[in-house]
Amino acid sequence: MKNSILAFSVHLFTATGAVFALFAMLAAGDKNWSVMFLWLLGALIVDGIDGPLARHFNVKKYAANWDGALLDLIIDYLTYVFIPAYALTKSSLLPEWEGWIAAIIIIITGVVYFADTRMKTADASFSGFPGCWNMVILVLFALWPPAWISLTVIAVLALAQFFNLKFVHPVRTLRWRPLSLTVMAIWTGIALWIGWTDFEPTPLAHLGLLLTSLYLMVAGILQQVFPKNQ
């Protein structure tokens, strides 16, 4: 009985991501971007913790009536894809019609990618860009580049969801995991700093955000280029 309660509690912990998604959506509706991203970062932290907890408490055995992977995907789609796309339509990062087109591209390609049974590789990495639009949009909001750069980034990453390009899972990809976890922790810390300061951090924060984002984008591709057996 105790094991079942603990295992089900992990599902409830995962479900708090949906609460964070609701609050992020409300903040986006008010164009309160710093609060929105803080809620999305909270959901990202939950998503990073619930997997190890699920394995530790063996939820597949003790809470088998609930599909933790499906629960995770539902919340991830809300926080990784849908809310960031919604934020694009409410912000002035892109001109109105371009923002709507970008948002539609994100939500359609994202839902197709999340339904792809081939999204995970043998080493627990992602095959194709894993739809982490929450991270991408945060970087764009922090740096506020010209519209054509934002559109190019969105178009390239939307296409990258459907190519055989590997993207590391910082927690589950064993190769370079200590480095990946460290970089992810630094990225999260910088993102929290940016959100807490209402997108007015020092240039050093922008540089750190760019460098850590670059690593998370290319680490898996570099692992493909330089296989472990070489």
Image: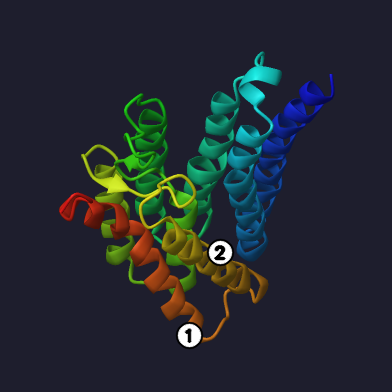
Residue 163 seen in this snapshot: yes
Lateral position of residue 100 relative to residue 219, left or right: right
Give the residue displayed 40% in from the left and 52% down from the top: 99
Query: What is the quadrant of the N terminus in the image?
Result: top right
Would you call the spot at circle 1 few (<14 residues within 10 Å), some (14-19), or many (20 or more)? Answer: few
Write down the residue under mark 2: 188
Q: For numbered disc 2, what is the local secondary structure?
A: helix
Lateral position of residue 156 relative to residue 110, left or right: left
Residue 168 x %, y %: 37, 50
Write down the residue under mark 1: 204
For residue 123, above or below residue 225:
above
> What residue type is disc 2 on?
Thr
Give the residue displayed 47% in from the left and 86% down from the top: 203
For residue 77, above or below residue 134:
above
Q: Residue furthest right?
A: 2
- Badge number at residue 226: none
Give the residue displayed 39% in from the left and 39% down from the top: 124
Lateral position of residue 128 relative to residue 196, left or right: left
Would you call the spot at circle 2 few (<14 residues within 10 Å), some (14-19), or many (20 or more)? Answer: some
Residue 129 x %, y %: 33, 45
Residue 144 seen in this snapshot: no
> What residue type is disc 1 on?
Leu
For residue 214, above or below residue 106:
below
Query: What is the quadrant of the C terminus in the image?
Result: bottom left
Q: For numbered disc 1, what is the local secondary structure?
A: helix
For residue 112, above or below residue 129:
above
Work out whether residue 182 or residue 211 is closer to the camera in this orientation and state it.
182
Q: Residue furthest front?
A: 229
Residue 28 x %, y %: 62, 53
Residue 36 x %, y %: 63, 56
